[in-house]
Amino acid sequence: MNSEEKPKRKIRSFVLRKGRLTKGQQRAMDLHYPRLGLDYQQELYDFEAIFGRQAPLVLEIGFGMGKSLAEQARDNRDSDFIGIEVHNPGVGACLVLAEEYDLENIRVINHDAVEVIENCIPDHSLDRIQIFFPDPWHKKRHHKRRIVQTEFCQKLHKKLKPGGILHLATDWENYAEHMLEVLNPMPEFKNLSETGDYVPRPDSRPLTKFEVRGQNLGHGVWDMMFSAK
């Protein structure tokens, strides 16, 4: 008798924690998500229709509480920004800032980034993809959960325009080394560092309070930028 193989369990780069939204975050979700939120769907988004214009398009994967993303949208109103985050309080917090900064050039997606990339983002549609301070999964047995892996970066490359930028940042040196080990050998990307490793923090990435605190304690932060060939 043939035994059926069990479906391979998908390795996820995140743990879905149940977080309680503050009253302000819930209000922002109720008030602004219908306008600034994009529901996950099994078909491609039409970003020109969504934003009502053609403009440089930036995607941030895992935007946390959304401060960096909202500040970029505030300071670059001639570009459009899409943020993906699985945790509800982060989405709510980002929408609070979107209201405070009076943003129309931002959209948020509350879903798994891998599925959004696979099913919703048109090929060659993005000018920049940024992944800032992703979960480092610092234990060696958990490294397979890190989102920066060759297969995922190949999918990201397909979504970037030729010459588009993949910008990564981490405060874990081991993860920074892992990112280089993944991306430097990939023929799809060119490392923009003159030394083949890291670049200074560009002005396009806002400095966070967490980062300043870490720097004061002597902690490092590593930025990497790759151009899509």
Image (cartoon, rainbow, N blue to C red):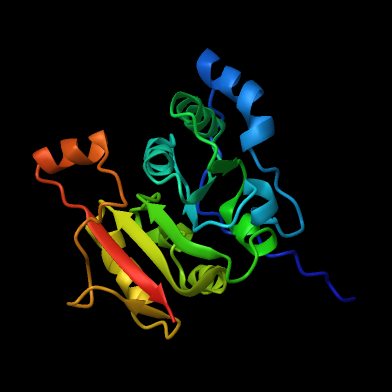
Residue at image point 26% right, 54% down: 172
Residue at image point 43% right, 38% down: 70
* Vertical side of 122 occupied by 21: above or below: above
Q: Nearer the viewer, residue 32 or 199?
A: 32
Please say whether residue 22 is visible from this viewpoint.
Answer: no
Q: Dividing the image into 4 quarters, which one contains the N terminus?
A: bottom right
Relative image position of residue 72 (x, y in whole percent): 38, 44
How many numbered callouts?
0
148 relative position to 85: left or right: left
Residue at image point 63% right, 55% down: 116
Dividing the picture into quarters, in which one does residue 88 lie? top right
Relative image position of residue 218 (x, y in whole percent): 9, 45
Among all residues in the image, which is located at the extreme bottom? 187
Dividing the picture into quarters, in which one does residue 167 lie? bottom left
Q: Nearer the viewer, residue 31 or 104?
A: 104
Residue at image point 25% right, 36% down: 210
101 relative position to 212: left or right: right
* Vertical side of 60 occupied by 17: above or below: above
Relative image position of residue 82 (x, y in whole percent): 54, 48
Relative image position of residue 225 (x, y in whole percent): 32, 67
